Image (cartoon, rainbow, N blue to C red):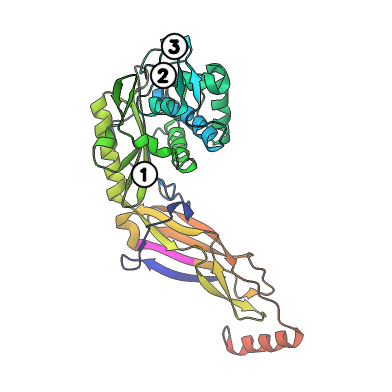
Amino acid sequence: MTIRTLRTLSPELVRVFAAAAMMALLVPLPRPAAAFETAAPQAILIDDATGTVLFEKNVDITVPPASMSKLMTIYLTFELLAEERLAPDDTFPVSEKAWRMGGSKMFVEVGSRVTIEDLLRGVIIQSGNDACIVLAEGIAGSEEAFAEQMNRKAAELGLMDSYFLNATGWPDEGHVMSVRDIAQISHHLIHDFPDHYPLFAELEFTYSGIRQGNRNPLLYKGLGADGLKTGYTEASGYGLAASVVQNDRRMILVIHGLESVNQRSQEAERLLNYGMHEFGNYSLFEKDEVVLDAEVWLGQEALVPLVLDEALTVTLKRRSRSDLQVAVVYDGPIPAPIEAGEEVAQLVVSAPDVPTLELPLRAQRSIERLSGFGRIGAAINYLLWGPGG
């Protein structure tokens, strides 16, 4: 077995991750020890580019999500717009049920018709329960039928701990999500609908002469926040699904179960500062970059270039980056013939307090086997002089 240590990642060798985050290979690395704490009963903080969990607390417990479940209502509406099955200027009628709905409101009028664009702003900015019901009834015929669509979409997106009974997040026993699921649908909203996602960053919306501000406290703090959704009921406490971009790096945060608006705002800012200051993203290899030229046995070429399937970026604590080890492991020399794309080695990435990461390395091009006389000569040469002789 051949093991080639490629590099010890020192600060001088680090290539800091900058652009094309979604082109990077998603590599969840550490779940850090509880060196940081939050008052939130449930919380998750994720580096969006690599999928690395930077902080987690009770992330898979099902809880009443309050208005954060409106993210699924928004997702289904965005999807219909992206598929051009709806247009922003299409209108839906306002039923008496929608008009009478309590809680946060957009203040639609019974019997009127409202555009999809206005309804979405009513849901995203004003957290309008009435707007959610108008969308649900317009899309599926009834809120109950729309909730079935929400559950089907949750299954498609891999939300393992979510079940919807209504379009609003109004308290209803059995209507639940986990903070991990809320973070996951937040990620999908950002990346599946880049044309519509900017609605989440709008600070205010006026409808029927009533101006309401966006309830996301992070939008007003200069942190680079661009979404997503607050939530509150007596049963759920105060929650927030948030997205923040700083220095071309996006983090997604979900907190739940806090005791006040101020505590929600403070804990969100604390967690985001922790993630930005304690962790960094480091690019190890670009797509199609040759990781190593490996020796070939009895091939028409002596070396075969090895590449990863995708670019590789890892997230780890900044103080650990100098101890990151990267090595290639393979049984060498690799016997010909070798097919382009064939897995012939592994890349092994390790660091203190980080689970070892093993990724397949593939031949960048095909290598044909030598002819009979060529094999004899190459074998003799190898026995006399070794690899490269």
**167 on left or right of 225:** right
The residue at the point 37 percent across, 57 percent down is 18
The residue tagged 1 is 251
**379 on left or right of 174:** right
- Residue 82, position in %: x, y? 53, 38
Q: Earlier in the sequence, mark 1 or mark 2?
A: 2
Q: Residues within 10 Å of mark 1 (few under 14, many from 20)?
A: many
- Residue 320, position in %: x, y? 33, 57
User: Is 173 above or below relative to 29?
Assistant: above
Q: Residues within 10 Å of mark 3 (few under 14, many from 20)?
A: some
Name the residue type under label 3. Val
Name the residue type under label 1. Met
User: Is 149 above or below relative to 50?
Assistant: above
Q: Earlier in the sequence, mark 3 or mark 2?
A: 3
* Residue found farthest to the right: 372
**What secondary structure is found at the residue carrying circle 3?**
loop
The residue at the point 49 percent across, 23 percent down is 91
The residue tagged 3 is 110
Q: Residues within 10 Å of mark 2 (few under 14, many from 20)?
A: many
Q: Which mark is residue 129?
A: 2
Name the residue type under label 2. Asn
Q: Nearer the viewer, residue 83 or 376?
A: 83
Q: Nearer the viewer, mark 1 or mark 2?
A: 2
**What secondary structure is found at the residue carrying circle 2?**
helix
Q: Nearer the viewer, mark 3 or mark 2?
A: 3
Q: Which mark is residue 287?
A: none
Residue 186 magenta: no
**What secondary structure is found at the residue carrying circle 1?**
strand
Q: Which residues are the magenta region? A: 323-327
Predominant secondary structure, magenta span: strand
